[in-house]
Image (cartoon, helix red, strand yellow):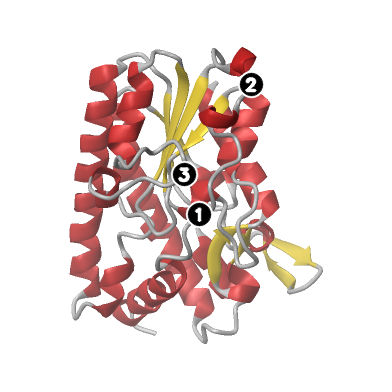
Amino acid sequence: MPRFALVVALLVALAACTSSPPPAPAPTNSTSTQPAEQKQQQVYVSIGDSYATGFAPGGTGESFAQIVAKQSGLKLVNLACNGATSADLATKPACGPDAGGKTQLDAAVEALKGGKTGLVTVVIGGNDLAPCALSQQPLDCATRTVADIQTNVAGTLSELRAVAPDVKIVGLTYPDVFLGAWVNPSFPNGKNLAQLSVTMFQDFNTKIAAQYGRFGAKFANVTEATGGYGALSELTQDPKYGRIPTSVAKVCALTYFCDRTDVHPTPAGHQAIAEAVTAANG
């Protein structure tokens, strides 16, 4: 399949799987419901998209943000929204009871002004590329969109740093779910698509990581932590798919893409992402 057609296939899959799902339910650990003795607990502010909310094909479950909060002893203020784009952080209302009708960025800034925030995570960008699936020039669209994501991330980080110069911020990327096209029957040329995705994720991650670095933020390379970048010539025996690349087997276990064509993480995937966040934060 020509490179152009492969990119179209990748973007179509992304559009099908990252369109706005149902709103995330209100977190159960809102500050309004905490006992008085826990009021002084340090806060972890999570902003972003459905990766942070824990959305999955079977309904919302425990997200990496909840896992990180429990393991670090921080009180989670999760402002993330299903389907959010990088532009939405500063323009659309945040989700959850801690939002107060503000945007994710404004609510995060207000939380930071309280002086008790120990960690901020940002996972964003996956939904931005969805409209490129319908573009007549998807490659050009993707190039422009990545530039827009960089700009929006930089704007977000600039405002966060203005009120909290020293707070720990960790930016996240995503698993290379398109490695799963290797075994997913929805993609007749899935092996070629999987190979193309490696280069595309490396390019995307390099550019986004640079933005976080500009503002003294850490970068959790979730792509690498969940099997990305591995040589597709390295094989393993998978109980469901037989002998396949090790990186493909890993992404099949950590996301729903291989069998459901859904980009979201499995519970094991959220655990792996939480571990990547903790490692970057350390």
Image location of residue 103, percent across then percent down:
29, 42
Is residue 48 found left or right of 61 in the rendered image? left
Image location of residue 62, percent across then percent down:
64, 47
Name the image quarter holding the N terminus.
bottom left
| Residue wearing tag 2 | 35
Instruction: Using the rendered view, name the quadrant where residue 199 is placed.
Output: bottom left
| Residue wearing tag 3 | 96
Q: Amino acid at mark 2?
A: Pro
Mark 1 near mark 3, Cβ–Cβ under 8 Å?
yes
162 up-or-down from 90: above or below: above
Residue at the image position 74 percent from the left and 70 percent from the top: 243
Q: Amino acid at mark 1?
A: Ala
Of label 1 and label 3, which has the lower sequence position? 1
Residue at the image position 62 percent from the left and 47 percent from the top: 270
Q: Amino acid at mark 3?
A: Gly
Q: Indicate which label's residue lies in the foreground, 2 or 1.
A: 2
Instruction: Say how many tags the image has.
Output: 3
Residue at the image position 33 percent from the left and 22 percent from the top: 216
Image location of residue 49, percent across then percent down:
43, 51
Depth check, front residue: 243 or 281: 281
- SS assignment at label 3: loop
| Residue wearing tag 1 | 24
103 up-or-down from 267: above or below: above
Distance from disc 1 to disc 3, alpha carbons, whole Å, reads: 8 Å
Say few, some or many: other residues with alpha carbon within 10 Å of mark 1 (under 14 / 14 to 19 / 20 or more).
many
